Image (tube, rainbow, N blue to C red):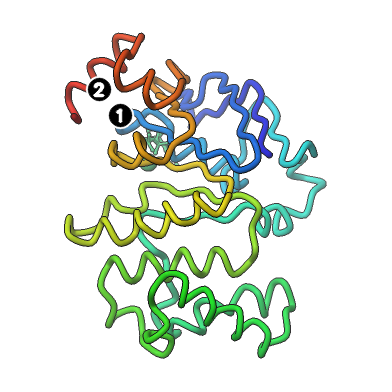
């Protein structure tokens, strides 16, 4: 589904991604972990072309994306993204938030988009909040709306950038539960998270980043029980 070859990205004189190679297969759940500043968000943003890279290639479903030639909105329809800070439209209610992109970007008929949105709200357990405004929702509810909103575009791949990091601890579980369900249904997912329990339980593969590189990758079992890289061991000692 995703092939990344020798991805290099600098901000000014700082090289943040130093040659990343990564492939993600259909229905695979890849969890990316690593210390703050290691380049995880930048990598996800590159996959979604919210950030332009300096060298390397990204292929989505075997198609190399050339940012200047490809319609990036089409790519973003196929690659949904959920952020740490929900980014809901504050002046739109939940339903309007969800149908905005399908109706205005994808030109889906409004009644059809609404029906789909209600199904998605059911799926994330928020059918009764369709008419609520974001300010009246908890963080966990907002994030579940953000997930429904991303799913409304019917993406083939979902990227999550620390989706539970801004939540009060008691609200983390409800969001992870929705993500776990999505994984079970076969969604291809790349998840940056500090939730090691989720990584252990849901990931097919764990990727450990440090200093803009992939320092180690493997099954959760391998990685958590027998990390090879010094930095991975130090990281696990800090977070577990
Ligand atoms: P992570 O998500 O692993 O914490 P990031 O990808 O956010 O790491 O950041 C990696 C490095 O790139 C950090 O040193 C950060 O300060 C820097 N960085 C990220 N975005 C920008 C930007 N837009 N401009 C300049 N530096 C940035
Ligand atoms: Mg980040």
The residue drawn where x is 61% and y is 40% is 52
State the CA–CA distance, disc 2 to disc 1: 7 Å
Number of residues whose C-alpha sits closer than 10 Å to that of mark 1, classed few (under 14), some (14–19) or many (20 or more): some
* Mark 2 burial class by Cα count in 10 Å: few <14, some 14-19, many 20+: some
Residue at mark 2: C-beta within 8 A of ligand 1:
no
Check the image and name the residue furthest to the front. 184
Q: Please tell me in which quadrant of the rendered image residue 14 appears.
A: top left
Image quarter for residue 108?
Answer: bottom right
Q: Is residue 43 above or below residue 121?
A: above
In the rendered image, the vertical position of residue 224 relative to residue 53, given as above or below: above
Camera-side mark, 2 or 1: 2
* Foreground of the two, 36 or 153: 153
Verify CB contact (< 8 Å) between mark 2 and mark 1: yes
Please state which of residues 229 and 91 is positioned toward the viewer in this rendering.
Answer: 229
Q: Which residue is labeled 2 in the image?
A: 235
Residue drawn at the location 37% of the way across and 64% of the way down: 143
Tell me what residue is drawn at x 65 percent, y 63 percent. 154
Q: Is mark 1 within 8 Å of ligand 1?
A: yes
**Element carrying mark 1:** loop
Q: Position of residue 61 (x, y in %)?
A: 75, 41
What label sits on residue 35 in the rendered view?
1
Residue 141 rendering spot, x and y as whole percentages = 32, 71
Q: Is residue 218 left or right of residue 1?
A: left
User: At 77% across and 54% down in the image, what residue appears?
Assistant: 71
């Amino acid at each position: 589904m995703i092939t990344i070859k020798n991805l290099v990205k600098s901000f000014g004189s700082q090289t943040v991604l130093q040659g990343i190679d990564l492939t993600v297969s259909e229905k695979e759940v890849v969890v990316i972990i690593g210390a703050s500043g290691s380049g995880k968000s930048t990598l996800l943003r590159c996959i979604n072309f919210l950030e332009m890279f300096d060298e390397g290639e990204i292929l989505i479903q075997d198609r190399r994306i050339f940012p200047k030639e490809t319609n990036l909105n089409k790519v973003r329809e196929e690659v949904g993204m959920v952020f740490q800070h929900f980014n809901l439209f504050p002046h739109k209610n939940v339903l309007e938030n969800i149908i905005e992109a399908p109706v205005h970007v994808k030109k889906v008929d409004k009644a059809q988009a609404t029906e789909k949105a209600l199904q998605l709200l059911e799926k994330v357990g928020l059918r009764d909040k369709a008419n609520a405004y974001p300010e009246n929702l908890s963080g966990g509810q907002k994030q579940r709306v953000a997930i429904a909103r991303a799913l409304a575009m019917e993406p083939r791949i979902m990227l999550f950038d620390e989706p539970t990091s801004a939540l009060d601890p008691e609200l983390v579980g409800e969001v992870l539960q929705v993500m776990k369900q999505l994984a079970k249904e076969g969604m291809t997912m790349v998840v940056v998270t500090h939730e090691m329990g989720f990584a252990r339980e849901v990931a097919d593969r764990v990727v450990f980043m440090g200093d803009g590189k992939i320092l180690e990758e493997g099954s959760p079992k391998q990685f958590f029980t027998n990390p090879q890289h010094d930095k991975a061991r130090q990281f696990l000692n800090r977070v577990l």
